[in-house]
């Protein structure tokens, strides 16, 4: 007689996914507070300007960035084993995010070719660009993997379809136009897409059901992999020849 399935303790991957969603949301909230409450230039400047040393909200910004880095790393740990490339890209994105929070930029976060940048500005800018690029490439890796869950592939495909052209536009704008409202707005949109994808993916991974075909049964002859015993031939008269 089949027994009703009872919810067991969450698997390590599901627990990592839940923690990833919490860290990403908390980190996004902290960075948003630092950006909105700080005396930054609004949409004309970069998000990173909220973490400039000496700013009244630099600590809040750094805490938020580190929480985001932890969330991305936990998301990498929560991915299924077959998505090793995506997990590696998320791991690289997590390390780059943490580096961007550790090495802050100077006032205005200047970057070439239109502004004179310090070594710290170059390190911070390079880490931020690498983090964003790695996360977007992770979306592509999930979307193109045939063995990935259909929901994960759909989320990744939609996010990548939005993020890829935006990233290309940001890169061209930084080279051709420089710091301004165009880059500032597009940067925030790209970051919002990455956050939404990370949280949505973590939610899907955290609430996935048991593997298909896993049936819990009781009694003799029951198997744990969903196999059923062959139908019994009791009651069949084997002495009667076939007609």
Image (cartoon, rainbow, N blue to C red):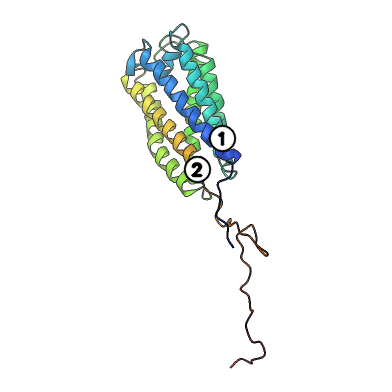
The answer to whether any part of residue 156 appears in the image is yes
The image quarter in which residue 109 lies:
top left
Name the residue at 50% across, 25% down: 68
Foreground pick, 110 / 80 = 80
Helix, strand or loop at mark 1: helix
Query: How many residues crowd mark 2 within 10 Å: few (<14), some (14–19), many (20+)?
Result: few
Helix, strand or loop at mark 2: loop
Residue lying farthest to the top in this orientation = 54
C-alpha span from label 1 to label 2: 11 Å
Q: Are the residues flagged by discs 1 and 2 in contact, CB closer than 8 Å?
A: no
> Quarter holding the C terminus?
bottom right
Judged left or right of residue 103, residue 237 is right
Name the residue at 41% across, 28% down: 191
Name the residue at 48% across, 32% down: 21
**Residue 96: % across, % down:** 54, 24
**Number of marks present in the image shown:** 2
Judged left or right of residue 131, residue 159 is left
Classify 78 as above or below 113: below
> Quarter holding the N terminus?
bottom right
**Residue 159: % across, % down:** 41, 38
Decide which of tag 1 and tag 2 comes sooner along the chain. Answer: 1
> Can you tell which mark lies on residue 207?
2
Foreground pick, 222 / 175 = 222
Name the residue at 43% across, 45% down: 154
Foreground pick, 214 / 97 = 214
Foreground pick, 213 / 150 = 213
Judged left or right of residue 45, residue 134 is right
Q: Which residue is mark 1?
A: 16
């Amino acid at each position: 007689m089949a027994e009703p399935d009872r919810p067991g303790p969450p698997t390590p991957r599901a627990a990592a996914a839940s923690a990833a969603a919490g860290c990403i949301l908390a980190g996004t909230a902290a960075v948003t507070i630092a950006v909105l409450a700080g005396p930054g230039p609004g949409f004309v400047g970069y998000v990173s300007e909220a973490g400039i040393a000496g700013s009244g909200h630099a600590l809040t910004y750094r805490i938020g960035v580190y929480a985001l880095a932890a969330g991305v790393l936990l998301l990498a740990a929560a991915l299924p084993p077959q998505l090793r490339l995506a997990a590696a890209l998320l791991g690289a994105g997590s390390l780059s995010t943490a580096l961007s929070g550790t090495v802050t930029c100077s006032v205005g976060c200047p970057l070439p070719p239109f502004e004179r940048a310090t070594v710290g500005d170059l390190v911070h800018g390079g880490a931020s660009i690498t983090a964003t690029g790695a996360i977007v490439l992770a979306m592509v890796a999930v979307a193109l993997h045939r063995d990935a869950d259909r929901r994960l592939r759909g989320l990744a495909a939609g996010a990548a379809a939005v993020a890829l052209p935006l990233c290309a536009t940001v890169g061209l704008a930084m080279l051709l136009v420089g710091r301004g409202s165009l880059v500032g707005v597009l940067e925030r949109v790209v970051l919002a897409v990455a956050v939404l994808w990370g949280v949505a993916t973590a939610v899907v991974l955290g609430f996935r059901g048991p593997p298909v075909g896993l049936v819990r049964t009781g009694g003799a002859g029951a198997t744990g992999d969903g196999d059923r015993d062959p139908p019994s031939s009791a009651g069949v008269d084997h002495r009667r020849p076939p007609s």
